[in-house]
Image: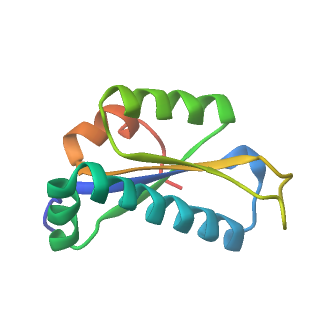
Amino acid sequence: MSEFRYKQVLVIRSDLKMSKGKIAAQAGHAAVSASEEARKKHRAWWKAWMEEGQCKVAVKVKSEKELLELEKQAKKLALPCALIIDRGLTEVPPGTITCLGIGPAPTEKIDRVTGMLPLL
């Protein structure tokens, strides 16, 4: 397998105990929203990621606090990101922060924020 120069990371809160379907939906929201952010603000990164095949990696954190700290770190590095806040129509209360999308961006930049996290 070749190494990807660009990727997107989807960070899911494991403490919420969401169903697989709910996790998939929330990760989808994060992927699309963060991708749009990259397309607007980092078009070259977005374009390269699209051409490489849109590598995505799903990882997990244990708390909202941990997720918000990652968002803060990503923003410090000027990485495109999208925090997903659920409307509360199915499994979690309204306003619950469920996940974070980071990138697409250069792999080495994203790894500085998420490289230590366990895979989902």
User: Which residue: 75% across, 60% down?
Assistant: 18
Residue lying at the far front of the rendered structure:
40
**Would you say residue 13 is visible in this rendering?**
no
User: Which residue: 58% across, 32% down?
Assistant: 68
**Would you say residue 6 is visible in this rendering?**
yes
Q: Could you tell me residue 119's position as x and y percent?
A: 48, 52
Front position in the image: 32 or 108: 32
User: Which residue: 70% across, 68% down?
Assistant: 22
Q: Could you tell me residue 7's position as x and y percent?
A: 28, 56
Image position of 3 (left or right of 96): left
Q: How is the image coloured?
A: rainbow
Q: Quadrant of the N terminus?
A: bottom left
Determine whether 32 is above or below 17 in the image: below
Front position in the image: 98 or 37: 37
Image position of 15 (left or right of 1): right
Residue 89 falls in which quadrant of the image? bottom right
Q: Could you tell me residue 76's position as x and y percent?
A: 35, 25
Image position of 10 (left or right of 61): left
Q: Quadrant of the C terminus?
A: bottom right
Front position in the image: 100 or 55: 100
Image label count: 0
Determine whether 118 is above or below 34 in the image: above
Determine whether 42 is above or below 39 in the image: above
Q: Could you tell me residue 25's position as x and y percent?
A: 62, 70
